[in-house]
Amino acid sequence: MEVILADWPIRLYSRWERWTDYSAHTYREGLTSEALKAADAAMAEVRKVAPDLASLSLLRQRMLSNSSSR
């Protein structure tokens, strides 16, 4: 899973099976100051739609079915 911060040259990346812990807190590792604030804000939004593997899987299925129906 990858989250790209629009205004920063930062990409937050997690292996699929580690998503729940990553989205909850480990994405913060190595970030400081304004980059950390931006990541916190982005991940707060991401957690609204994909807080765990089950919801992430559903989101992925929806995205794949939308792209195949075009």
Image (spheres, rainbow, N blue to C red):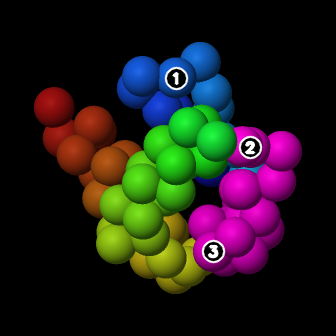
Percent x, y of residue 34: 56, 37
Q: Would you name the residue on which mark 2 appears?
A: 31
Name which residue lies at 74% across and 43% down.
31
Q: Which residues are magenta?
A: 16-32
As measured in the structure, the alpha-carbon distance from the residue carrying label 3 to the one carrying label 2 is: 15 Å
Give the mark nearer the N terminus: 3 vs 2. Answer: 3
Give the mark nearer the N terminus: 1 vs 3. Answer: 1
Q: Would you name the residue on which mark 3 appears?
A: 24
Residue 31 lies in the magenta-colored region: yes
Q: Nearer the viewer, residue 5 or 70?
A: 5
As measured in the structure, the alpha-carbon distance from the residue carrying label 1 to the one carrying label 2 is: 12 Å
What type is the residue that disc 2 sits on? Leu
Q: Nearer the viewer, residue 44 or 17?
A: 44
Q: Would you name the residue on which mark 1 appears?
A: 8
What type is the residue that disc 1 sits on? Trp
Q: Quadrant of the C terminus?
A: top left
Residue 52 figure quarter? bottom right
Q: Callout 1: few (<14), some (14-19), or many (20+) C-alpha neighbours within 10 Å? A: few
What type is the residue that disc 3 sits on? Ala
As measured in the structure, the alpha-carbon distance from the residue carrying label 1 to the one carrying label 3 is: 20 Å
